[in-house]
């Protein structure tokens, strides 16, 4: 590696637990592919309160970070600690990408842009609806905003916390045909698509957010979880012949969009795809 020329671009991920993240591999490979050097640091913060989060965010600019990603459970907690929000992040009221510019922290949400692009790639320019969306947390909200971009697509949102689902519905009022359902059965009945936006099914959890009996072959099923890539939900959906999209697509597309925000350079998708597959392959078995 050449020394003394370019300082590596410093990037990172704030969340917990994040040891399994494919983000370091993806961003470092993307940088290399466009002739840059990046160092992507995992910033694992279990149980951080607002003061601890503020301290970490306050250190980013002085230390020289170009930006960081934010994941569970801090996508909403960071909002009041930022200097500005992109329109997308404001719409979702969740942030997964923070860009450091001239000492200011600007929040973006590339889960939204990434999910919309991934969905089109997997299921065509106008995915079949209605869509049952499980989860109204950080990822669920981003998915809801992404689905709202497809004209006339009915979204049925269900969350273990009905108040959370109601808040998302209120935020999207007038922008989407979104209905809050109390029970998963109600959301899935007659639905053509299902999206899991919860951590259910993420290792070590082996649960499913949707009882298998509600699945049928005419559906498409997408999962935001990528550890494991084939969650119990997706494994069963594929087994019965439903079309599936793993968390790989969302992971890669949100990272592509984040890399462009961090560096001002378009990352080659192929470099990120290869890096993701290498990072996740050992766990796929």
Image (cartoon, grey):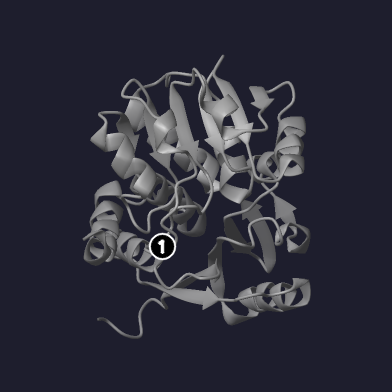
Q: Is residue 240 left or right of residue 260?
A: left
Tell which of 238 and 263 is nearer to you: 238
The answer to whether residue 35 shows anywhere in this view is no
From this view, report whether residue 187 is shown above or below residue 143: above
Q: Residue furthest front?
A: 213
Label 1 packing within 10 angstroms: few (<14), some (14-19), many (20+): some
For the point 65% across and 54% down, the residue is 107
Q: Residue furthest top?
A: 152
The answer to which image quadrant residue 283 occupies is bottom left
The residue indicated by pointer 1 is 203
Report the quarter where the N terminus lies: bottom left
For the point 41% across and 62% down, the residue is 203
Report the quarter where the C terminus lies: bottom left
Q: Is residue 134 left or right of residue 9?
A: right
* Residue 217: percent from left, percent from top: 31, 24
* Residue 119: percent from left, percent from top: 40, 32
Q: Is residue 238 left or right of residue 20?
A: left
The answer to which image quadrant residue 4 occupies is bottom left
The answer to which image quadrant residue 3 occupies is bottom left
Q: Circle 1 — which element?
A: loop
The answer to whether residue 99 shows anywhere in this view is yes
* Residue 266: percent from left, percent from top: 38, 49
Tell which of 32 and 175 is nearer to you: 175
User: How many numbered discs sit on the rendered protein?
Assistant: 1
* Residue 15: percent from left, percent from top: 56, 68
For the point 60% across and 60% down, the residue is 98
Tell which of 212 and 34 is nearer to you: 212
């Amino acid at each position: 590696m050449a020394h003394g020329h370019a300082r590596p671009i410093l990037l990172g991920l704030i969340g917990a637990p994040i040891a399994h993240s494919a983000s370091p591999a993806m961003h470092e490979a993307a940088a290399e592919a466009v002739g840059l050097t990046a160092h992507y640091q995992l910033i694992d913060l279990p149980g951080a309160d607002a003061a601890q989060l503020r301290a970490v965010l306050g250190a980013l600019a002085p230390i020289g970070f170009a930006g960081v990603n934010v994941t569970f459970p801090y996508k909403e907690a960071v909002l009041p600690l930022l200097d500005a929000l992109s329109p997308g992040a404001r719409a979702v009221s969740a942030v997964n990408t923070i860009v450091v510019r001239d000492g200011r922290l600007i929040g973006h949400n590339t889960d939204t842009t990434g999910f919309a692009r991934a969905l089109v790639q997997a299921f065509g320019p106008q995915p079949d609806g209605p869509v049952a969306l499980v989860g109204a947390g950080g990822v669920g909200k981003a998915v809801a905003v992404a689905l709202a971009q497809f004209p006339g697509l009915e979204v049925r949102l269900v969350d273990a916390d009905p108040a959370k689902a109601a808040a998302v519905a209120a935020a999207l009022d007038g922008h989407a045909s979104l209905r809050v359902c109390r029970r998963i059965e109600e959301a899935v009945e007659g639905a053509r698509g299902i999206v899991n936006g919860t951590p259910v099914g993420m290792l070590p959890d082996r649960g499913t957010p949707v009882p298998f009996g509600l699945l049928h072959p005419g559906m498409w099923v997408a999962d935001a979880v990528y550890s494991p890539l084939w969650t119990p939900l997706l494994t069963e959906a594929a087994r019965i012949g439903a079309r599936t999209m793993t968390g790989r697509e969302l992971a890669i597309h949100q990272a592509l969009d984040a890399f462009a925000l961090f560096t001002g350079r378009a990352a080659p998708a192929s470099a990120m795809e290869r890096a993701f597959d290498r990072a996740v392959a050992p766990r796929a078995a």
